[in-house]
Image (cartoon, rainbow, N blue to C red):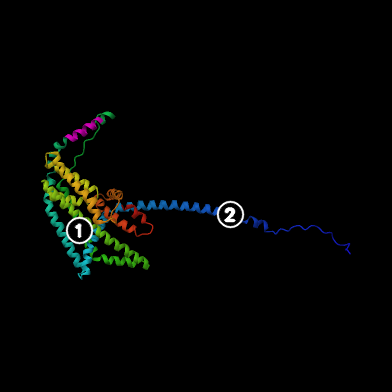
Amino acid sequence: MSDPQATPLTPATPTVAPGAAVSSKAPLLREHHRKLNGTSIRRISRHMRSIRMVLQTMLFLAIIYTVTIGKPLLIPLLLAGFIGLGLNPIVSLGARLGVPRWLSACVVMLALGTAVGAGTSMVAPAALNWFHQTPEAMRQLAPKIKPMTQQLEAASRATQNLVGGNPRAGQPAAPVAVFSSWDVITGAPKVMASVLTVVLLVFFFLIYGDELLRRAVEVSPTFAQKRHTVSIVRSIQSEVSRYLLTTMAINAGLGLVTAAMLYGYGVPDPLLWGTVAMLFNFVPYVGAITTTVVLCLVGLLHFNDAGTALLPALSFAAITAIEGNVITPMIQGRRMRLSPVAILLWLLIWGWLWGIPGALLAVPMLTSAKLVAARLRGWEWFAMMVVR
């Protein structure tokens, strides 16, 4: 029987937990937060890249300024360092044979000084003679190049007439270069001090080079860094030494061949111009072009016929072409072949910063930078860019 007091049945209503609505929106909130975090991270990364670029630019400008200001100190150090690297294999060979490093260094420096002194004494009289005869030589050269200068002047006048105006009007007189023996005398003490500084630095580098390497290894904190430091320094020592010795031998051979060629043509003072060719060839491309121009002027001074006068310069151009494209790549190998574009840019940069010493040191510095960059993580691209 049914209970009359029983309550009527009502349909059951679903019950919703309080956190159910929040939990249904949680994926959307997480996705929103993820997008916000990603946007913030990208914005911070862009700001960090901008700050890093500004700091790198400021560091680069500071290095350029320091290199320019420190020119009187850095040039002797680098020159002595490269000469020391070139002569270090001889001293190391003596040390392996049981000869003390200081004795080997003394013998090497004495032999080098004797060779340089003998060469200087052989070419100095001819160089002084040409120095004193330069004004007279220029007066003799003027009639021979007058036809060419007349054509250039005619072209210049025609251009001035086209643009309007008198070609002579408003042009200041060209300054006269004044250079006397007194300038050489007054500059001699400074040159002698620089030479003595380089000689002393080379001597001490040859004696204490290995000691400096040991100190550099001791500073490195871990064994891996010590081994990496030794690898970099040893590779620079061996490869730069080989490069410098090979380059000196090639340039000396070029100087001898040039002197023999000029002697065959009957050009006066062939040994002087062979020495000029040897020294200028340390500056790639620019040195060969400069020597060719110098030999062209010397030929015009010595010979009356234009074809005969240009023959020494053309012969030297052919010799340097064979040396630069056949002999040097065959001896030095592909690893030490640098890109011509990189060499020219490097010459422009260091010639602008340091002048003639910078042009002479540019290629050894580029070679050393390539060797170091090839062994540093993150700098392999530089080594790949400068290699041909």
- Which label belongs to residue 329? none
User: Residue at image x 61%, y 56%?
Assistant: 27
Looking at the rendered image, the disc whose residue lies closer to the viewer, 2 or 1, is 2
60 relative position to 94: left or right:
right
Spatial distance from mark 2 to mark 1, Cα to Cα?
A: 73 Å
- Residue 260, given in percent of the width and then of the height, sits at 13, 50
- Residue 135, given in percent of the width and then of the height, sits at 13, 41
Mark 1 is on which residue type? Leu
- Residue 336, given in percent of the width and then of the height, sits at 28, 56
Write down the residue under mark 1.
Answer: 196
Rendered view: 380 above or below 289: below
* Quadrant of res 14: bottom right
| Marker count (numbered) | 2
User: Residue at image x 36%, y 65%?
Assistant: 225
287 relative position to 47: left or right:
left
Mark 2 is on which residue type? Glu
Closer to the camera, 258 or 139? 258
Q: Look at the magenta stretch and give its main secondary structure.
A: helix
Closer to the camera, 291 or 186? 291
Write down the residue under mark 2.
Answer: 31
Residue 282 makes an appearance in the image: no
